[in-house]
Image (spheres, grey):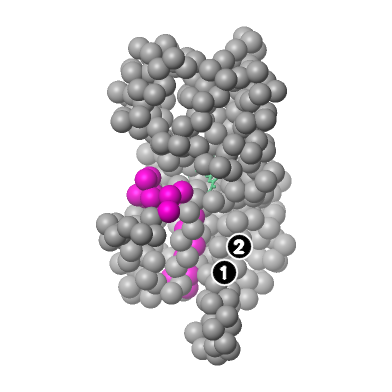
Amino acid sequence: MKIAFYGTKPYDRIWFEPMGKEYGFDIHFIEAACNRETIFMAKGYDAICIFVNDYVDAEMINALYEMSVKAILLRSAGYNNVDVKAAEDKIIIMRVPSYSPEAVAEFSMALLLTVNRLTHKAYNRTRDFNMSLNGLMGMDLYEKTAGVIGTGKIGQAMIRILNGFQMHVLCYDPFPVEGLEAEYVSLEEIFKYSDVITLHCPLTSDTKHIINKETIAKMKNGVFLINTSRGALIDTEALIEAMLQNKFGGVGLDVYEEEEGVFYEDRSGDIVKDDNLARLLTFPNVLVTSHMGFFTREAMQAIALTTLENAYALENGLPLVNQVGREADLQ
Ligand code: NAD
């Protein structure tokens, strides 16, 4: 199988290069992101392999179909960046439904601990021999209430971590699961009672801007908000408006609505054109990271393995257990 691998970073090659050889795949590593300008590079390949900040819209699906590309191999769990409907009966889409939920949950907790205890600021201060504590006061997480929105694999891992801190854990999911050490409540109650709100649901038409002006107004003053799921779960302008009114104790964002083309790139020498992102970065209690919740050795290895297993299954006519849109039928 010939695979056009878009958006290649050095850390992708560590596992994909040797494992791809073991499978006998011919992988062509392309640095450019997959978009309308670069889709022509898929010509002559059986599959393209893409990540979260690549996209494939309906027009690109048609282009791939005409180029006889059979599959889109997502090296991610989320697939909101691909027009799944347009691909129906044309191109098979496969994803990596689970690689290390713990990696993302642990990173969510890292964001929470950082924006709460301001260790990133303390680090900078002490390096400059500024040993003052002014402005660095946090709150105990012990016995506070955490609200988890989305209790899938990552949400459940987060619930385990929050319980380790002896927090009272509330959760919301339209498809509740049994046996969690957390209390299912309504979304309203999550907003009303939580000292910490952490987002672990996918981006869908239902969840887009689930955090907006109205829902923020329902939250406690001083609430902490953590988003490691997808940027568009939060209405950024509403968030900024609320930040200006001191609504939040702290906000940790691993994802951002307009991250495409910015995250994963070194833009340090460029003029920032995104005023909302620039504004967010000015708040002392906001920490933005570059969509790196997944970024552990274990997760990267698992992503490579599952992506190549998906390609192998396709090539050898095996059941496509990770096919997007068909997973429910196969379970
Ligand atoms: P999952 O499919 O296991 O769980 C998602 C859960 O969200 C499901 O239980 C689902 O029922 C629930 N859900 C659906 N609609 C909802 C709604 N309206 N309100 C509340 N819950 C809703 O997915 P997961 O593996 O736990 O991943 C969660 C999200 O994390 C992914 O969709 C992806 O966007 C994000 N993610 C981020 C990173 C990162 O590096 N930051 C890495 C992996 C995944």
Tag 1: residue type? Thr
Numbered circle sitting on residue 110: 2
Q: Are marks 1 and 2 in contact (CB under 8 Å)?
A: yes
Under circle 2, the secondary element is helix
- From the viewer's perspective, tell me whether residue 171 is left or right of residue 79: right
What is the distance, in whole Å, between disc 1 and disc 2 at their CAs?
6 Å
Q: Magenta includes 283?
A: no
Q: Residue 178 sits in which quadrant? A: top right
Q: Provide the residue span drawn in magenta.
A: 247-266
Inspect this view and state whether residue 77 appears: no
Q: Is residue 274 left or right of residue 289?
A: left
Amino acid marked by disc 2: Ala
- Which mark, by number, is residue 114? 1
- Can residue 297 be seen in this snapshot? yes
Compared to residue 277, the image places residue 173 above or below, namely above
Quarter of the image where the C terminus is located = top right
* Secondary structure mostly seen in the magenta stretch: loop
Q: Position of residue 198 (x, y in %)?
A: 53, 57
Give the class, few, some or many, for how many residues have Cα within 10 Å of label 1's Cα (few <14, many ≥20). Answer: many
Relative to 61, is 175 above or below? below
